[in-house]
Amino acid sequence: MNDTVVRRFLDTADRLQNKVAVSTCRNGRWMDLQWKDYLEMVQSFAAGLRALGVQPGDRVAILAQTRLEWAAFDLATLGLGAVTVPIYPSSTATEVQFILQDSEAKVLVIESQGAWSKFKASIQAQSAHLPAQSANSAASDEKLGANLQALVCLEVGKSTNSEARSQLSLEQFIQGGVAIRQSQPNFFVEAAQKLNVDQMATIIYTSGTTGRPKGVVHTHQQILSEVVEAFPLLGVSSQDVALTFLPFAHVLGRIEIWGQAVVGHRIAYAESIERIKDNLMQVKPTVMIGVPRIFEKIHAGIQAQADISPIRRKTFDWALAVGREVSRCKQEKRSVSLQTAAQYLAAQRLVFQALQDRLGGRLRFAVCGGAPLSREIAEFFHAAGLLILEGYGLTETTAAICVNTPFDYKFGTVGKPVGEVKIKIAEDGEILVKSKKVMKEYYKNPEATAEVFDGEWFKTGDIGELTDSGHLKITDRKKDLIKTAGGKYVAPQRLESLLKLSPFISNAHIHGDQRKYCVALLTVAEDHLRRWANEQNLQAQQSVHLLEEMIEHPKVKDLFRRAVAEANAQLASFESIKNFALLARDFSIESGELTPSLKVKRKIVDERYRDLIDSLY
């Protein structure tokens, strides 16, 4: 049998049969699933897919929130030699339509019939201007993928005869595969034995900040190369517990499925992003993978709590100063003085333990990827007793190609190359990569594929440098670099990270390309601002109630002016922010201004707020 993630999954399930593999929360109750039961679920899903006619090479699309069934469908699909096509739940109907058509998906797994009806209705609405016969239900089905033969709904629902497609509830889907399992008990193992490492395993469509998504093709080789090197490098073992909440349509979330299949640790599925705070305390994870926005929000919440009273702020600042000294000692691998050690124990008891308890109390480290994490945030958490290990990679590189580790980390960098990864810096500063982890190609797009390869080297589109210690430091996205009218290059992500250190700023967008100077659009962290406004008696004295009114108040503008000044104090004159505007509404995935990994879509924001940006010059 070729070595694949599926083969490793079968070995893990056999080795850890009676140990807990998965924890899920349904209706407020946490339920555990042992490895033998997880394998049973995967095999029943594989049988259901085979009963629907899924053969090696066929595409199975999954459009659902992060949940146990998502992971089981992925492993079942890969084990059959078929190809998983993930779709973000936040995708527009047009994006879903494109992915289903481009990938030629045969089966679609979706959260509910209601979600399917919503997408169909949107496509029909878009077709309203076409001749009447083109806008009927069957026509809209065709627009959502001519190859699509079956729909599986994860949540309870009954199929209807009026649908052009075969719609199945999850129960009906599983029942359809019973006969196959009875006649061929070992069919899944036999199918997995036939897998070849060079077979296509998944097509992951990039969300991108601009343009039509491209289908990134990964074979079984890329998937296995990533997880067998990255997870052991971090020191993750079968004794660990992880809380997962990232979208599985994103490659960073997806490697949690594959990594668990190889390592055998327990994964608990968060109920939702909104419930992460509660779930952390319930699950008590030992490791966690997140994106910068999660840690930025936790940081903002901690700062806001410290501001509740002058005494609390003074105590917090003292504890943080002590924690920073301990952090420096750890980074420089030198011993902590007895006096500092005693102070740190007091700081732990008075301040940091409560913070760590809010994260479950057992977190050994967290891994951060998907977008740049500011050095200031990483150092803040390390001082408070939590190590955040920043890594770097792209969808095209199957997630991490560099990562800091618990025993080798440098804040402000994304770590050293993982395993067999080789990195070099081009003359223009672009990071080039050679590795088994790099994608095979962009699906049905040879022109785009040719553009990102320079011989054997993959062009990442990121600018960076290697430090003397061999750690990679990212400067910015090559396409995101701003060139001011004065000819100076500015890396906007650095400016945005500094601005978001303020608990009052939720998101920031820097503009300045071909302009005299840089300006910023700042979205407001409403909860923190309202708390501050109450302390200042703004609402009582000035009758300021709506957020739109509040951000126009002179005291509020001065508050944000100080936040911008604090960021500017760390910037050179040519890159400093000369003007800014406050937005009462935050950027969001639903509004199309953020990618699913919570990065700002620069082109969209520039276009949407063009008049406001122009007014700042």
Image (spheres, helix red, strand yellow):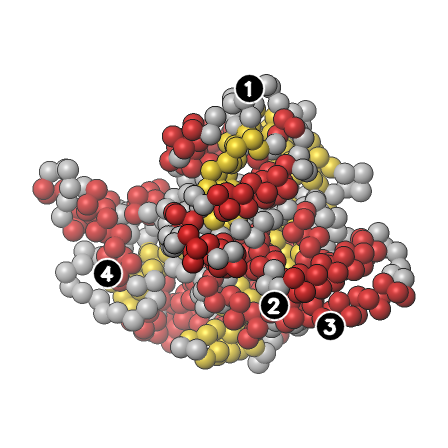
The percent position of residue 82, horizontal first and vertical second, equals 43, 54
The answer for how far apart the CA atoms under marks 4 and 1 are is: 58 Å
Image mark for residue 485: 1
Q: Secondary structure at mark 3?
A: helix
The residue carrying pointer 4 sits among few (fewer than 14), some (14 to 19) or many (20 or more) residues within 10 Å by Cα, namely some
Please tell me in which quadrant of the rendered image residue 174 appears: bottom left
Q: Which residue is mark 3?
A: 349
Instruction: Mark 3 and mark 4 in contact? Answer it, CB < 8 Å.
Output: no
Please tell me in which quadrant of the rendered image residue 84 appears: bottom left
359 to 557, vertically: above or below: below
Residue sitting at the far front: 541
Q: Sequence-wise, which precedes: disc 2 or disc 4?
A: 4
The answer for how far apart the CA atoms under marks 2 and 1 are is: 46 Å
The amino acid type of the residue labelled 3 equals: Arg
The amino acid type of the residue labelled 4 equals: Ser
Image mark for residue 49: none
The answer for how far apart the CA atoms under marks 1 and 3 are is: 52 Å
Residue 445 horizontal side relative to residue 474, left or right: left
The residue carrying pointer 3 sits among few (fewer than 14), some (14 to 19) or many (20 or more) residues within 10 Å by Cα, namely few
The percent position of residue 133, horizontal first and vertical second, equals 10, 43
Q: Sequence-wise, which precedes: disc 2 or disc 1?
A: 2
Which quarter of the figure is the N terminus placed in?
bottom right
Give the mark toward the camera: 2 or 4.
2
Give the mark toward the camera: 3 or 2.
3
Give the mark toward the camera: 2 or 1.
1
Image mark for residue 359: 2
The amino acid type of the residue labelled 2 equals: Leu
Instruction: Mark 3 and mark 2 in contact? Answer it, CB < 8 Å.
Output: no
Front residue of 25/74: it is 25
